[in-house]
Amino acid sequence: MALVAGAENQRLAEPENGLEALNALVGDDLKSVNRLIVKHMDSPVALIPQLAGHIIAAGGKRLRPMLTLATAQLCGYRGERHLALAACVEFIHTATLLHDDVVDDSDLRRGLSTANAVWGNKASVLVGDFLFSRAFQLMVADGSLKVLDVLSNASAVIAEGEVQQLITSNNCETSQQEYLEVISAKTAALFAAASRIGAVVAERPEADEAALDYYGRNFGIAFQLVDDVLDYSALQTTLGKTIGDDFREGKITLPVVLAISRGSSEERSFWRRCLEDMEQGPEDLDHAVALMDKHGALTESMERARHYGRIAREALDVFPDSEVKTALTNVIGFCIERAY
Amino acid sequence: MALVAGAENQRLAEPENGLEALNALVGDDLKSVNRLIVKHMDSPVALIPQLAGHIIAAGGKRLRPMLTLATAQLCGYRGERHLALAACVEFIHTATLLHDDVVDDSDLRRGLSTANAVWGNKASVLVGDFLFSRAFQLMVADGSLKVLDVLSNASAVIAEGEVQQLITSNNCETSQQEYLEVISAKTAALFAAASRIGAVVAERPEADEAALDYYGRNFGIAFQLVDDVLDYSALQTTLGKTIGDDFREGKITLPVVLAISRGSSEERSFWRRCLEDMEQGPEDLDHAVALMDKHGALTESMERARHYGRIAREALDVFPDSEVKTALTNVIGFCIERAY
């Protein structure tokens, strides 16, 4: 603990290859998962595989299914159930993205135009519904009520978080606590469920399930904090995403909450005009970033991310050392430090 | 069969009190279901019960959950599982309505303004997701993989049907067969699942499950056919819905398919202008109805509805006579003849 506390302001170790190492360890499984994804997103209604393929093939990091694969490996699981369940996790994630696209009007996601922009709102909502239903069909085929319990609970919590986010949008009075509730639900719940499933399929004791749930939950919070920082970072453009999406939508993320709470009354008027009244001029995004810099809002948000990253890392302490444990640890650092 | 054929053009018996009789038989159960609905749509995120309550409390006929309650009774079921499962069915139906509102821009549903119009697209999508997830949580709590199988399959088919409908929209080449596929999926699949569940909870043999599935499926097709006729009927206004919604959206329903296939090339140009190019003037809806009358498109659609209604009624033949069997029979006639 002293060592961890001493490392308070340092980066987590070995972030550079955090994702590659995890990828190498679960790579074969991930290929199987990708095959299952392609197989199960098929439908005689051709628009479904077209649209779903557009967003799923665009790829992303497959971080959530990788968590299921890696935690199953960590728990010594030797069967094949984790493959279809990892596909379920990706389907639920993709359904959420599709519905979020409808919601957010974002122009770019994963470097490609959103499904929404190409096929329209209607199709995004309905294909999302299909993927969500398909995920439940796959879980039913797996046959474990415990898995169904974990993922149906996560799905309900995600939806609650998305609605809560809608309420906090355009509200400059949003507190840090409310922000944390939103990201715990909309992002961390699926990270937690994806990680817990590894222990469930391996039939490990509840304590191991809980440890992996805690790992995923705190990792997910760290991940979303970094995502919210990246939306105000020039680095975002190198990831193929636009900068300032959250600002243009009036989304209240931690950098904004901190900048508002540390700002002058004149600054608060600026934030209210931009994010509540949604009156934004061409210079306003730059000014917003300048205010965040002035108040250390982005740096502080990154510190919070590292804090949750450390908690996630410590959650793995109950597991004996192994290559996959190291990879699950280092991928946290990778995801956090991608912001710099 | 001769008797049925002879009754080809007659109304089904006793339509007047079809719904009331069913309501009387399952009324106590339905009250329990309504309590479960209110209880389980609750969430600390206040917008969820507000929005869900708006659409669920608006009521509707609760036809789908009533099918689950009545078929359970028909199968001699004596437990309480059917109550939560009937609530699941209503949640899935409501989620579909909410997502359909996003899709359809309809101004009125069940006599109230749509949730979409009041709270916006975003909230409708996300609260729909919540209700859908909540339905799966309730099924998991019930603990039957068979029920989960039935309803997850139905959900995937519904989503496929909604996407298929999107593709046939604004396409005057849509065939009767394609139309039938759409309504079999988007509407009849949930009627079938809701009815099958009664046999599942009562642990009746597969043949009884299949009979009730067939009952629900054909009833659902008849129901949707009538719904599509009503959209061009003045009677619609007395049901608190606007007339011509489908026309304004360019939705291709059976009355349109029939009018197009029986129409002159000049008439086909009219349909293409209105439903493909979406260029509609103030007189066009009246002209559309006049063309449908001229070609008997609405009458023929009603005949088809009665045809499927008869098939649904015959599916109940394997069950011994009882009050609830009579009610399940007569409710078909009620739903069909509400159009006149």
Image: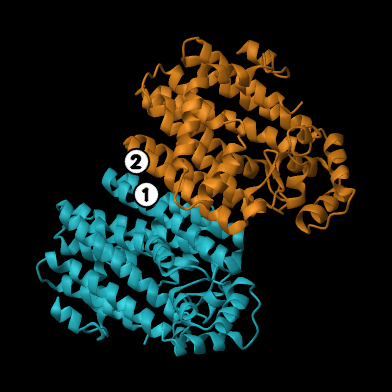
Chain colours: A orange, B cyan
Image quadrant where one finds the N terminus of chain B: bottom left
Q: In this picture, is A284 found above or below B176?
A: above
Q: In this picture, is B291 found above or below A254?
A: below
> Residue B318 in the image: x percent, y percent?
12, 64
Q: Amino acid at mark 2?
A: Val
- Is A246 positioned to the left or the right of B334 in the image? right
Label 2 Cα crowd, 10 Å radius (few <14 / some 14-19 / many 20+): many
Residue A156 showing in the rendered view: no
Q: Residue at x 45, y 89 (%)?
A: B293
Q: Indicate the chain on which mark 1 is placed.
A: B
Q: Indicate the chain on which mark 2 is placed.
A: A
Residue B86 showing in the rendered view: yes
Quarter where residue B328 is shown: bottom left
Which residue is the site of mark 1?
B152
Measure the alpha-carbon separation of dots 2 and 1: 8 Å
- Is B312 positioned to the left or the right of B317 in the image? right
Which residue is the site of mark 2?
A140
> Residue B217 in the image: x percent, y percent?
30, 64
Q: Residue at x 61, y 33 (%)?
A: A221
- Is B180 positioned to the left or the right of A314 in the image? left
Which element carries disc 2, helix, strand or loop?
helix
Q: Amino acid at mark 1?
A: Ser
> Badges 2 and 1: C-beta atoms under 8 Å apart?
yes
